[in-house]
């Protein structure tokens, strides 16, 4: 097995084009997923009243646009072949575990989206949901976390270090922002702390730190 | 930590992906070691030395000598 001459002088772990397309794909997938969960909920429960509402119109625009942009981004990514050569068995295993942990969380997130279908915020709202949906979503989340632990202990040392770096940033942000927000809310400066807002910000920071460290 | 990994890899005509396959790590790990952004653990350093059949100190240099 020999490499082409240009392959011997790689200096970048990932091209900026691949990174930009991957980021776009992730954002579009999130937007598309949230809209799809609401749409599936309306179809299953035949909530006719939502179709003419602003919420319904938003979903009917966001979903096809997400599919279109996401499809184009995925096609572009496949053309660039970002994997760039053979993949070691350990890396293949960690890649599979990473995607499986994400996929296991999807039914729970979908159920949560369906349970929140009548709320303007949809998936991200704080509206009441049925107990069955809550139990299903929590079980799906715990299963995804268990697989992500398996992923962590299967990952190579560079990947683990990158994840640890992101986690440290997320930890620092959480222990700083949470009490500050709580105190500010008690003084009437801010609304009551929202657990999911804190979670989303923390996960976002973990993800940014992790990928920056991995692909810098 | 300085290292000669890129030179050794080029001498064997391997791409980063091919070296990663032989070390059972990701290509990003090989890239990070080559560019000095990641110092490998002792066990990975030994694996690298065994692969190239040379002592560790001929690959890695902490700049103290």
Image (cartoon, coloured by chain):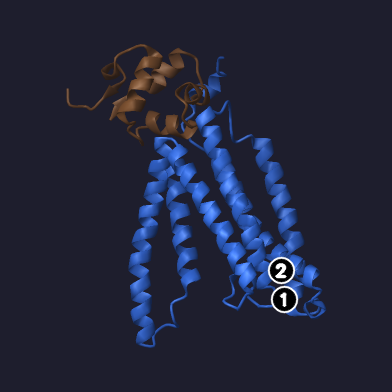
Q: In the rendered image, which residue does mark 2 sit on?
A: A38
Closer mark to the observer between disc 2 and disc 1: 2
The image position of residue A177, as x and y in percent, is: 37, 70
Q: Tally the numbered discs.
A: 2
Q: Which mark is drawn over residue A55?
A: 1
- The residue shown at (50%, 15%) is B13
Q: Which chain is blue?
A: A
Tell me which corner region of the image, top left, top right, bottom left or bottom right, holds residue A97: top right
- The residue shown at (38%, 76%) is A181
- Who is closer to the viewer here, A158 or A136? A136
Q: Alpha carbon of mark 2 to alpha carbon of mark 1: how far?
A: 9 Å
Q: Chain of mark 1?
A: A
- The residue shown at (66%, 62%) is A110
Q: Quadrant of the N terminus of chain B?
A: top left
Is B44 rendered above or below residue A177? above
Dot 2, crowdedness within 10 Å: few (<14), some or many (≥20)? many
- The residue shown at (79%, 76%) is A47
Query: Left or right: B14 with respect to A174?
Result: right
Chain B drawn colour: brown
Q: Is residue B4 visible?
A: no
Q: Chain of mark 2?
A: A
- Who is closer to the viewer here, A102 or A209? A102
- SS label for mark 2: helix
- SS label for mark 1: helix
Is B56 rendered above or below residue B34? above
Is A29 rendered above or below residue A77? below
The image position of residue A130, as x and y in percent, is: 64, 74
Q: Are marks 2 and 1 in contact (CB under 8 Å)?
A: yes
Query: Left or right: A19 with respect to A40?
Result: left
The image position of residue A216, as x and y in percent, is: 43, 42
């Amino acid at each position: 097995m020999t490499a082409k001459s240009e392959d011997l002088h790689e200096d970048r772990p990932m091209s900026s084009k691949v990174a930009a397309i991957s980021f776009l794909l992730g954002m579009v997938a999130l937007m598309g997923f949230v809209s799809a969960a609401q749409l599936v909920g309306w179809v299953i429960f035949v909530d006719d009243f939502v179709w003419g509402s602003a919420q319904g119109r938003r979903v009917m625009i966001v979903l096809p646009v997400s599919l279109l942009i996401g499809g184009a981004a995925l096609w572009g990514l496949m053309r660039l072949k970002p994997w760039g050569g053979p993949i070691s068995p350990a890396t293949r295993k960690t890649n599979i575990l990473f995607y499986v942990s994400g996929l296991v969380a999807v039914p729970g997130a979908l159920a949560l989206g369906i349970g929140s279908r009548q709320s303007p915020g949809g998936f991200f709202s704080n509206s009441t949901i049925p107990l069955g949906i809550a139990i299903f979503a929590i079980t799906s989340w715990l299963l995804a976390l268990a697989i992500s632990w398996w992923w962590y202990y299967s990952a190579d040392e560079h990947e683990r270090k990158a994840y640890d770096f992101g986690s440290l940033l997320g930890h620092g942000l959480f222990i700083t922002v949470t009490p500050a927000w709580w105190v500010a809310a008690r003084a009437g400066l801010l609304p009551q702390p929202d657990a999911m807002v804190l979670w989303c910000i923390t996960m976002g920071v973990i993800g940014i730190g992790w990928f920056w460290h991995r692909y810098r | 930590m300085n290292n000669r990994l890129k030179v050794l890899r080029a001498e064997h005509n391997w791409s980063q992906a091919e070296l990663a396959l032989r070390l059972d790590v990701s290509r990003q790990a090989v890239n990070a070691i080559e560019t000095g952004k990641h110092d490998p653990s002792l066990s990975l350093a030994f694996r690298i030395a065994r692969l190239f059949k040379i002592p560790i100190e001929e690959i890695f240099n902490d700049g103290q000598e």
